[in-house]
Image (cartoon, rainbow, N blue to C red):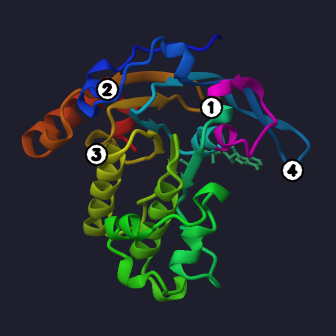
């Protein structure tokens, strides 16, 4: 199955004041996984992904949803170049892009301060970068000299977000970054992510199980099938983010649950 080119999201580009690309194909980030298999301990193989293709339109916020074990993390790993053992291809634009990734575990070096954890991720040309704005954004300036053991999980996740944003990525991949946080902290971080995403052009792909989270953050959802995973459906969410609360959010969720019944069961 060939890569699908999905419609260019002109409304969002207008909203963010981002110049239109001449041709989507020049800039879009495409992923085509014809097959991904894992070896089993008994010597057999299991096919986790088959004919999974999607295109990320630049500067959009996409959520990747699907049943547990369908290959979402594996897809991110392939995109990050951490798993090359698959048949298919990712677009050259994707391979060239500056990446940042945020995982469930903040993955901070315990022997380094907050500031050093962020600074270590910077490319050489940004070595002297002023980190005050990004630390202000995550409200951690007062903790820039603190060590990870002195931080709560929510604070450590904020450091991970700040680290990801400080490298000024073209693509930000997030793998359930807010799971197992209390709802208030998770909401604060979602809001922060949205603000950071709106503050500069970055293409975001976030894996989540949380349909409510996806409905609040994404402007596009990609829903995967059970394994071997392929794209079961995609949908655009055009409702402005500021309006995604109360009755409007409930309507959106009902509509999504109707369109993708498997998500309602997650
Ligand atoms: N290194 C590995 N070796 C063998 N099997 C693996 C390996 N990594 C993942 N798998 C298998 O591949 C399948 C997909 O795993 P993956 O972590 O990508 O799923 P997921 O959709 O992210 O799951 P979840 O939503 O539960 O986090 C699972 O069945 C998993 O057991």
Residue carrying label 4: 41
Task: Find the distance from the CA under tag 1 to the CA under tag 2.
Answer: 19 Å
Any atom of ligand 1 within 8 Å of the CB at mark 3? no
Q: Dot 2, how many residues are within 10 Å of its Cα: few (below 14), some (14-19), or many (20+)?
A: some
Which residue occupies 50% across, 50% down? 168
The spot of residue 115 in percent (x, y) is: 52, 76
For mark 3, give the secondary structure: helix
Q: Do the residues labelled 2 and 3 touch (CB within 8 Å)?
A: no
Query: Does the Cβ of the disc 4 residue fall within 8 Å of ligand 1?
Result: no
Nearer-the-camera pick, 34 or 129: 129
Give coordinates of residue 228: x percent, y percent. 65, 29
Residue 221 in view here: yes
Asked if labels 3 and 4 touch by Cβ distance under 8 angstroms, the answer is: no
Mark 1 lies within 8 Å of ligand 1 (Cβ measured): no
Disc assigned to residue 94: 1
Q: Is residue 34 visible?
A: no
**Magenta stretch, residue numbers:** 77-93
Residues 264 and 149: in front is 149
| Alpha carbons under labels 4 and 3: distance apart | 37 Å
Separation of disc 2 and disc 4 at Cα?
A: 48 Å
The residue that disc 3 covers is 212
* Residue 69 quadrant: top right
x, y percent for residue 18? 34, 29
Q: Which of marks 4 and 1 is nearer the N terminus?
A: 4
Q: What kind of element bears circle 4?
A: loop
Q: Residue at x 31, y 19 (%)?
A: 10
Earlier residue among tags 3 and 1 = 1
Residue sticking out furthest to the right: 43
Check the image and report above or below for 83 versus 26. below
In the displayed structure image, the side of residue 125 where residue 4 appears, left or right: left
Give the residue at mark 2. Answer: 13
């Amino acid at each position: 199955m060939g890569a699908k080119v999905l419609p260019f999201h002109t409304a969002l580009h207008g909203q963010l004041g981002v110049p239109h690309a001449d041709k989507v194909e020049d800039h879009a980030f495409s992923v085509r996984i014809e097959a991904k298999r894992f070896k089993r301990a008994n010597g057999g193989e299991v096919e986790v992904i088959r004919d999974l293709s999607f295109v990320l339109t630049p500067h959009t916020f996409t959520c990747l949803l699907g049943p547990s074990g369908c290959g979402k993390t594996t897809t991110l790993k392939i995109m990050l170049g951490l798993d090359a053992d698959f048949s298919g291809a990712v677009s050259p634009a994707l391979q060239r892009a500056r990446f940042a990734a945020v995982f469930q575990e903040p993955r901070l070096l315990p022997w380094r301060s907050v500031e050093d954890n962020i600074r270590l991720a910077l490319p050489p040309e940004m070595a002297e970068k002023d980190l005050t704005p990004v630390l202000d954004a995550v409200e951690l300036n007062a903790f820039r000299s603190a060590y990870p053991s002195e931080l709560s999980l929510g604070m450590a996740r904020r450091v991970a977000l700040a680290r990801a944003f400080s490298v000024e990525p073209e693509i930000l991949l997030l793998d359930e970054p807010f799971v197992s946080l209390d709802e208030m902290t998770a909401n604060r971080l979602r809001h922060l992510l949205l603000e950071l995403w709106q503050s500069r052009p970055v293409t975001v792909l976030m894996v989540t199980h949380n349909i409510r989270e996806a409905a609040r953050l994404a402007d596009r959802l990609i829903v995967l099938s059970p394994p071997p995973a392929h794209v079961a459906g995609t949908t655009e969410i055009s409702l402005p983010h500021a309006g995604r609360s109360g009755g409007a959010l409930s309507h959106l969720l009902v509509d999504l649950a109707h369109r993708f019944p498997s998500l309602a069961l997650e």
